[in-house]
Image (tube, rainbow, N blue to C red):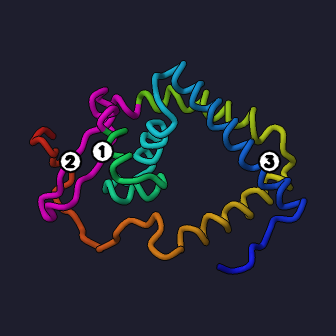
Amino acid sequence: MGHARWLNDEEKRAWTAFTTAHALLYRRLEQQLKRDFGLSGLQYEILARLSGAPNREMRMAELASALVNSKSGLTYQLGHTEKSGLVRRRSCPSDDRAVYAVLTGDGMALLERAAPGHVETVRELLFDVLTPDQVRALAEGLGEASRRMAEGPGEGRAAADGTACSGAGAAVDGRA
């Protein structure tokens, strides 16, 4: 085992500030979404990611990767949003392995109601307390760290086999 590269005082301060701010922000966002809309943070992110995707749909593996979540964790959360009529799943007629998550009209309507309060909470708790230079440094620093972690050997990346799916709109259970 190699020599540990311990954090210096400034790195410890940054790490503690990051982990504490992340936990507090996540908790407050979860509380606001649950209280106002009955959504978890991950359910909100599912709706938000699908809303920005072409045809408001994404392959499940790609959605899991984008959300930095396991396929099983996404499947569980998608089950709840599907029961609520916010999303539906559809199969791909040209690739039996591919399943897509599709944002429904009800899901989009809920997202449109939830987004303003969610964004205001993010703004109030994070961005309103930072200077523009701090926001830029945060975006650059965390963006670089995220990029490097995402490029790691097999970590968190969806299998991209390039398989195209025709027949958009075919539902898993036969309902369109």
In this figure, which residue is indicated by the disc labeled 2? 90
> Mark 1: which secondary structure?
strand
- Between disc 1 and disc 3, the foreground one is 3
Question: What amino acid is found at the position of numbered circle 3 in the picture?
Answer: Ala
Question: What amino acid is found at the position of numbered circle 2 in the picture?
Answer: Arg
Is 36 or 120 nearer to us in this picture? 36
Contact, CB < 8 Å: mark 1 with mark 2? yes
Contact, CB < 8 Å: mark 1 with mark 3? no
Report the residue that reaches farthest toward the right.
9
Contact, CB < 8 Å: mark 2 with mark 3? no
- Dot 1 or dot 2: first in sequence order is 2
Binning the other alpha carbons within 10 Å of mark 2 as few (below 14), some (14 to 19) or many (20 upward) gives many
Residue 111: horizontal and vertical position, in percent? 46, 32
Q: On the image, which quarter does residue 118 sit in?
A: top right
In this figure, which residue is indicated by the disc labeled 1? 102
In this figure, which residue is indicated by the disc labeled 3? 17
Q: Quadrant of the N terminus?
A: bottom right
